[in-house]
Every structure is written in C-alpha cells, then in structure tokens.
Amino acid sequence: MVEAPDSRGLRRVTVGNETVGSAWSPGELRRILRRLGFPEDADLEDTAFLCWRGGDSRTWPDRPWLRRAVLVLMVVGLLASMVLSAVVGWPDAGGALTFAQRITGVLFVLSGLVQGLAAVAALDYWGRRQLRVSGAVVLLGVLISLATESLLLFMWLEEKEYTPYLLVFLPLWCWSLWALVLLLREKCWTGVPWPKRFAAGVVATALLTGVSLAYSTMYQPTAAPVHFSLKAKFGDSRTDRRVSFVHVPMTLYLKNTGGIPVYVINDVYTVRGRTPEYSRYPGNEDLLREWRESAGTLRSQAGEAELYVDNLRKTVISSGHFYGPGKWLEVGQEYSLERVFQIPKDPPYDTITVNVQVSYMRKDRGKLDVDEFSTAHYTWDKSEGQYYCEWQGCGQQLIYSGRVRHNNNLINVTRRPRFVTAVWSPGLWFISSISSLRFKEAKGALREEKRELDRYGAASIRTDAEVPVAEILRSAGL
C-alpha cells in the first residue's frame, strides 16, 4: 500500500498494518520493493501487488531542492546560534566573579547545547520523521535563538554602537523569526506525547533564565556595598647629624572593609608644607576683610578660610603612588605603606599636610587587563607614540591605559571595547576615566565617561592628615 503524500510530498509504504518505508520518488519506492523481494523491474502499475491511495504512480509532489534548502537554512541557523550562545556564555560560566553571573553563563552554554540537538533533530524532521519529538525539539531551539538574539538586539539598541557581533545576531534574529513562522505553520508539535508538559518546561526555563539574568546584571551589582578604611598618620621625627634636615615618618593604611573586591585604578599621596603670612591685624580689627582675603587665597579648597593668616602657599614636599594602578584588593585585604620625607631643621612651614586619594573600580562589574594597564607610559618620551606630549603643554605625566571588560559578557558583545585611562603627576590630583575611546580621543567625552564610571562602579576615596611643624621639631628634639 502506497499512502497519499503528506505536506512535504513523502509517501508512506505499508504491508498490512506495518510501515516498511517511505519514498520521495519512484526510484526510492523501487528500492523499498527490492528490499521486500520484488524484482528490480517490477511494474508499478500492477495492482496485483501495489495499491495506491491519494494519487497514482505519477503523483510525486516532492520538491527536493526546496526541502533541502529549508533544511540547510534551518541547520545552519541553529548551529550559528549555538556558537553565539557558547561565545556569550562561556566567559561568564568559567570566569565570572559572582555565582549568579556564572549561573547565567552556564544557562547560555546549556541553551547552545539544546540548539545543537535541535540542529540534529532538524535532519530528522525534514527527513523521514522517525522521531515523534523532532519537530518539538527544533521548535525549542528556534525559540531559544529568538529569545537570545532579541535580548542582544535590545541591549544593542541602548547604545547603538557598532560591534562585529552585530553582523551575527541581527541576521540570526531575522532568521529565527522566519523559522518560527515556518514551524508554527507546519504545527511541528504534532506527535509530542505530552505537549502541555513540554510547553510548561519551555516557559519555566525562560523564566529561570530571565530571573537569573536580571539578578546578576541589575540587582546584585547594586546591592553589595563598597567600603574602605583609609588612614594617614605621622610618626615621631628624627634629626640627622650629617645633614641639616629632619626625617619625618608617616604611615598610610588601606583596607577593603566592604563586600566586593575592587581594582585600584589610580592613587596618590602628596605631602605639602604650608607657608602663611600671619595677620598684621590681631584681635577684631577689620574682621570681615581678614576673613575675605584669607578665603580668596584658598579658592581650591571651597569652604575653608583662615582668620589670622594671609597669602597661604603650599609647597609639595613629597608625592608618589600609594598602592599602585592595576592592582586589586580582595574583601578584607589590607595594605600599609611607611614613608619618610625630609624637611629643613629651620623650615619655612607652620604645618605639614598629607593628602591620600585612591580611585577604584568594582571587580564584580568589570575585568581589567592588568598586564596592559599597569604599564606606565611617560608623556615626555617620544617613543611612547600616542602618549607623547611636549612638556610645555602636558607637563611630565604618567599615563596608564588598558582594556576593561564587563563581567556580564552580554554587554561586551553589544558594546564597543571600553578603556580605562589614568593620568598621574607628582603633586597634582590625578584624572581617571572609562570610555570607548583611547587616551587622546577620550578628551571631551565627559558624558560618556560619567556613564561608564557609574556602570563599572568607579569612584574615589580620600583622607587628609595635618600636623604642626612645631610638633615635628619637638619630637626631633629641636
């Protein structure tokens, strides 16, 4: 018995109640007959041994070129989506800092495996359909592809920056829409033993993925606090018989007391001596004028003014890095630095101040290329290329620059690369920025820099300590 052709032109062949094969063409039918013991030149019109339903021996509506083209497009699309899911999920699955981010990466890798199985199932579904669930597996793979590509496209639309991955997920998004329409039109879920359970499993998987992604990208990076303990303290000074200077020790201390490890982007400590001109108007004479003139000399320190001193000048005595750009502090890790600086035995200063500032970036939001970033570039060295700048315009600065990757790889594949740039110069407050532009190109991109600093959780902390010179000389025995 040769049954009527199905929607694809395939005709089932039965003997009694047993299916013995299926054929796309007369040639395939003859092969089935030979396997059953019929002669090679059997007459297909002989109704003594062949019965035709839904058409005679000339009814073969199969269009093999169309069927094979659909099969190739389906398999190629599923395999490409599988590779993209693996590329997106593998870095997070193996190297993300938080557990939730690793779970998200694992889910993407598993979804890629499902798409690989769907590509294998497509060979059966557009073939002889020997497996009842092959159509449902292909549908699941296409739904995963549509969800993944839609998420990538949505995230790309936030910034609309060109990335090579756009040439992959945008065509795959169009392909997944075409594949979904095709499968729904063919009602590919027909034959699934428990269609309601299958649909419930798909919905539960989608909800689990969505909740995990939202937790790892939105809630967790903002819920965990960042706290530091930063201290500066002067020690007892000592004189030196060989030179007319006083050695002043100081201790700088840093500890990560919060719940998140951080990268140190830049840091500086600066010791300054204050040289004032004391008031010629003691008491309450011309009080407002004295206050106004004092405040005018301290414009860089808004809100600070001295009543009995004028013409304040601050001289840089010592300056340097504290912890070091590109290093990181784990939770609970602490670091202490002891330094000694010198002042004359008869100094022109009345107080000594040390300012310590540390700029950091949350490690749970980004991964810094520390090998690249920790290398200092000297602006006065012509061999530094793009970092070179004549000292009349730039002074003498150290530039640190390196690539930073977001800990959620979904953002990495939908954005241009981001770079961290830090500028350091002795005695000056440093500059740190994160943007999609390199060192010189990044100047002026203030809006983007602020957005990226917030995205990567970058901020600064500072502490100050001040001691009278009289106290330093007293501890030195002068």
Image (tube, rainbow, N blue to C red):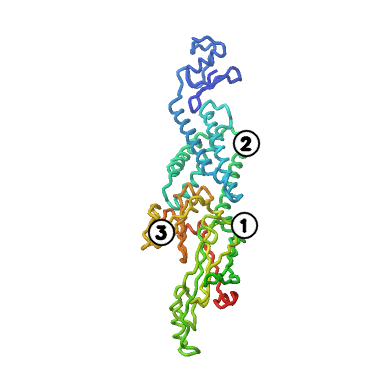
Nearest-to-viewer mark from 1 and 2:
1
Q: Nearer the viewer, residue 53 or 382?
A: 382
Residue labelled with disc 1: 331
The answer to whether residue 168 is left or right of residue 361 is left
Mark 2 surroundings: few (<14), some (14-19) or many (≥20) residues within 10 A: few
Helix, strand or loop at disc 1?
A: loop
Q: Nearer the viewer, residue 432 or 279?
A: 279
Residue labelled with disc 2: 194
Q: Quadrant of the N terminus?
A: top right
Q: Tell me the distance, in whole angstroms, between the alpha carbons under discs 1 and 2.
A: 50 Å
Q: Amino acid at mark 2?
A: Trp
| Residue 303 appearing in the image | no
Question: Which percent across, then down, holds residue 214?
Answer: 56, 52
Nearest-to-viewer mark from 2 and 3:
3
Residue labelled with disc 3: 445
Q: Tell me the distance, in whole angstroms, between the alpha carbons under discs 2 and 3.
A: 56 Å
Q: Amino acid at mark 3?
A: Ala
Q: Which mark is first along the chain, 2 or 1?
A: 2
Question: Which percent across, then down, holds residue 452?
Answer: 47, 57
Q: Which mark is first along the chain, 1 or 3?
A: 1
Look at the picture and state if 203 lies above or below 136.
below
Helix, strand or loop at disc 2?
A: loop
Q: Are marks 1 and 2 in contact (CB under 8 Å)?
A: no
Q: Tell me the distance, in whole angstroms, between the alpha carbons under discs 3 and 1.
A: 33 Å
Q: Amino acid at mark 1?
A: Val
